[in-house]
Amino acid sequence: MGMPRKLKGFNLFQNGENFVGQVAEVTLPKLTRKMEDYQGGGMSGPIKIDFGQEGIQLEWTCGGFMRAVLAQYGITKHDGVLLRFAGGYQSEDSTGVDSIEIVIKGRHMEIDPGTAKTKEDTAFKVTTVASYYKLTINGEDVIEIDFINMVEKINGNDLLAALRTAIGL
């Protein structure tokens, strides 16, 4: 019987800048498929039709004001901000550590500097929306989603390759 792998440490990088000690929390991107019910004649119930990936975003909380983040606000390129989450996960029945990396390219949709109160926590929250997402576990690519180039690779299998060919891409 195995124990679950738990996050033992993490770091966040923005455009290669190391934010060690500055980021208190990261809400990792939720992956959600856009699906709608379909029930045609002769079907006894609906099935979900998969219309692809929903939008992807990463939310993170900094310990205080961060000029480097503010400088990226309003960037016009869809992939102008590169964020890399690096996490070390370990189970209590192993000495090994799994390296989990999530890379997103996007831009900051919201920066919430919170409240200003002397001698109180100065949490600084950021929501970054992505046009690109990649999950790597121990150096192996597991999921890669590239909205602009119409790529969805899961375990090396490109789910959209045939569709790209069908529409001449």
Image (spheres, rainbow, N blue to C red):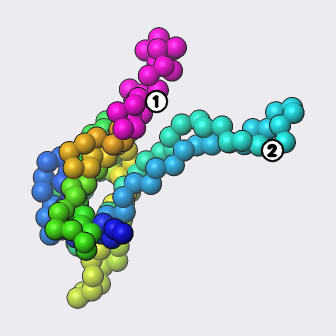
Q: Quadrant of the C terminus?
A: top left
Furthest toward the right, the residue is: 42
x, y percent for residue 149: 38, 26
Query: Residue 22 or 92: which is nearer the viewer?
Result: 92
Q: Residue at x 40, y 31 (%)?
A: 157
Find residue 80 and name its label. none
Find residue 159 and name its label. 1
Distance from Cα at disc 2 to Cα at disc 1: 26 Å
Find residue 45 and name its label. 2
Q: Which residues fall within the magenta stretch?
A: 147-169
SS type, badge 2: loop
Amino acid at the residue labelled 1: Leu
Furthest toward the top, the residue is: 168
Residue 61 appearing in the image: no
Q: Residue at x 40, y 38 (%)?
A: 154
Amino acid at the residue labelled 2: Gly
The correct choice, above or below, for 61 with respect to 39 in the image is below
